Image (cartoon, grey):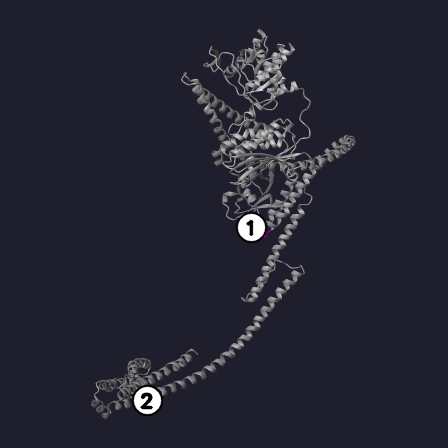
Amino acid sequence: MSVLQKEIDYVSEHDIEVHDLANQIQKNVLDMETGMRGYVITGNDGYLEPYNLAGRSWLDNYNKLHSLLIDNSRQQRNLEEMKPLILSWVTNTGEYVINAKKANNTAALDKHFSENTGKKITDQLRTQLDSFLANEKKITTERTKLLNQSNMNLKITLYTIILLVTVITIATAIILSNSIVKTIKQVVKAIMSITDSEVDLTTRIKVNTRDETQELAEAMNRLLSNLEKQSWVQKSMTDIATMYQGITEIKELAQAFITKLAPLLHATYGVVYLRKSDAGGGTYYVKVAGYALADEENAAASFRLGEGLIGQAALDKRIFLTDKLPKEHLKVTSGLGASSPRNLLIAPILVDDRVEAVIEFAALQPFRARHLTLLDMLQDKFGSAITSVAGRMEVERLLGESQILTEELQAQSEELQAQSEELQMQQEQLRITNEFLEEKNKFAEQRAAELKIAKDELEDYSLKLKLSSQYKTDFLANMSHELRTPLNSILILSQMLMENNAEMDRSEVEEYARVVHTSGGDLLRLIDDILDLSKVEAGKIEILIDEVNVTEIPQLLKNTFDPVAAKKNLTFNVLTDPDVPAVILTDGQRLQQILKNLLSNAFKFTEQGSVKVQIALADREKAAELLGIQTDELILAISVTDTGIGIPSDKQQIIFDAFQQVDGTTNRQYGGTGLGLSISREFTRLLGGAIDVESELDKGSTFTLYIPSKREPAYQGRDLHQALKEVAATRDGTTREQEGTTEKAEWPANERTVAVCSGTRTMAEYSDGHSEVTYSDKRTEIGYSGEYTEAEDLDEYTEAEMSDKQLFKGKKVLLVEDDGRNIYALVTALESRGVIVQVAKNGKRAIEMLQAYADYDLIFMDIMMPVMGGYEAMKVIRHDLGLETLPIIALTAKAMKGERDKCLEAGASDYIMKPLNIDQLFSLMRVWLTEQVEQD
């Protein structure tokens, strides 16, 4: 068939191609002839394109045709005879005519065409090509006949082969069918026997063919193998499970397990390790059973987690299988000799993901898959058996202990029964306690809520405290400046007076003394401001409610601030509404201080315009809003209005806070400590009132003071003489009355001058810091300017009986003071009135002097002294020396609340605060010396 196909391909490809190439050569010759004739006739070069293309193609076609005719030499020779004709025509006709036409040689053309040279060659070439094609057709026809004959022969052969193949196929099918049916019957029989549970799983289906039937048989054999393995595993598990019954000891269980399992796995060696825990909580595994152990010393007694393959299997919780053990690893002995197992199997027994035991087997033969399957399925069973037996052992142990405890419980039952009644009583008490605890719990929850609120308040207070600390720092910086300024002038002028070498005239000395006195007053006012603020913060300010004459307030304010207004060219008016009551009940001294601070600020921050004070009854609704309460008390509204610089809206509340001013620029421009408004607000609060401010920047401010009139006066019906004594002794207004405006204006006072009767004295300081008073004969006059106090009423009282000279002259006074400067000042002042003064530097020295000579009319006792203080000294004088009637006036620099009571309790008759006002000192002396004269 392949030969026939080759012949058909040869005919269809070779002969057809030969015909095509011959026709193509004939066409090429025709194209050249047609192109030449067209060019000659028209002279158009476009006719030369077919000529040139055919001239290039005919030779290629010739060569291809020549190569195809290599098996037919006769036709090849015929073809070779045509080549010279084509070349001759191209040279002698085609090229000659075209060149003549290009040269426009008409005569040559006419001659050529008249001779018919080219036509002769063309006709001859056509004849030869026709002959060549006729021969090729004949050859092709002969080849076709041969192909038809071969095709017929092939058909006959094929029909014969098909018949033979059909016969063979039928025979083969019959044979294969019998084999397949036989195999299928065997498979069906095996499956039916499996269904009936009567199969011999060791039986296998044998097939000799290598086809799908063999695959079916092999699949059935694999199924039988799996079933055999499963049956073996199930039977083995059943045998081992029945072995557990009746075992109550762990070691017995382990030994029975290894003895039963080792032969099933074809193992020649086996060991069981059980889990134990040490005192520290660590885990280790101890050998409890073995199989075929020849030398137990070589088998390790225990393993810890991760130690050896046993410990590592317990740690990893997986099976280890090794099939290439070295010969020296283990020896299994028998009566005939010893062998070395080459296969090792280590498996952990897990219960609830915890390794309870590890088993190890060694075998001469490799462990099979069903062995591993059996071991894997036995893990849970054996682990459960271990925990079950361990549980039974623990139950038995606990049962034994429980029997012992039962006996003890029986012994205790009577005691418990006796205690039951007591417990019933305690139960009732517990119920009562529980109710109490519930109440306490509710209280604790309420307390916790309160504590949370308090914590939030403390956090808020902490933030405010940080701000307050910053404000105090700023205040101390300002206060340092305010204190140093007057102190500087005092130090400089006092040094100049001390170094005076008689070159200064009296007017300079008086001016220096006046400036020193003024600076001292300024210093005192600053100290009083600080003390007032500390008293307010400590809650130790005493409020003395008394009748205050409202009609006198305008005149007092005019007297104080008219000079200031005149100096600054400001208009100052004080207006009172007609419905204002003449008298209210409040602390007049605090009221005056508040008004003085408000007016001082008004004048300080006003450069032009006016300052006005308006006294009226307060609007009830406004007062109730500010005071936070509804009251029927009469409330006075005193407004201070100025046309000064004003206060920004965001600063109108902080100016009342302690240590705060509007800003640093104002402080530098206008000075001051920034305490006035803070003290005024606190005094107002203590009086039950409030301060309201309305201000607009650069237009002025209005501060309104709301003061309620209290219903009950603070004290009534005191004895006049006792009242005068208390006024002289306890009134701390001495320092307050020295306060003034920036122009040092003071509340109305009387001026008087007292002559100095004694010689002057000087004060020298020793190197040890003590001071000594010396005397000289030079006499001088010193003037004192005293403020108006209630002591002037006392002057009228005493002057009706005796003069100062008669009262003070010859009186003996003991001055107990350690500061040389105070000694100098007091001795000078007292001796100027004719008083005889003796000095003791401390309390102990004063007691010694009183023991030696007790005929003193009065004692001035300083409180803070070395060796023995004033409190202790006064107690000794009163109790140990028995001088109970001797007047003792305490000199104290402590201006806090309760200081007077403390001095009186120690034995003082009265007390006076430092810095001493000399007029107040003499007023106090008059009270006590007059009383002593009356007693005499």
Q: Is residue 288 left or right of residue 566?
A: right
Q: Please say if 616 is above or below 380.
A: above
Check the image and report above or below for 768 versus 268: above
Secondary structure beneath disc 2? Answer: helix
State the image coordinates of residue 778 (x, y, percent, origin top left).
46, 11
Q: Marks 1 and 2, how far apart in space?
A: 93 Å
Question: Foreground: 75 or 860?
Answer: 860
Q: Position of residue 202 (x, y in %)?
A: 61, 58
Q: Say whether marks 1 and 2 touch (CB < 8 Å).
A: no
Residue 582, quarter of the rendered image: top right
Q: Say how many tags the image has.
A: 2
Is residue 372 inside the magenta stretch? yes
Is 127 in front, or is 739? Answer: 739
Query: Which residue is more in the foreground, 283 or 745?
Result: 745
* Residue segment shown in magenta: 367-373
| Badge 1 amino acid | Phe
Q: Which residue is mark 2?
A: 130
Write the residue at 52% across / 19% down: 784
Residue that label 1 marks: 367
Q: Secondary structure at mark 1?
A: loop
Taking the image as drawn, is residue 82 in sight?
Answer: yes
Image location (x, y in percent) of residue 330: 53, 43
Which is more N-terminal, label 2 or label 1?
A: 2
Name the mark nearer the viewer: 1 or 2: 2
Quarter of the C terminus within the rendering: top right
The residue that appears at 57% across and 66% down in the rendered structure is 213
Q: Quadrant of residue 790?
A: top right
Q: Where residue 839 sits in the image (x, y, percent)?
A: 53, 11
Q: Compared with residue 579, is residue 492 higher up or lower down, i.e. above or below?
A: above
- Can residue 659 be seen here? The reply is no
The verdict on residue 157 being magenta is no
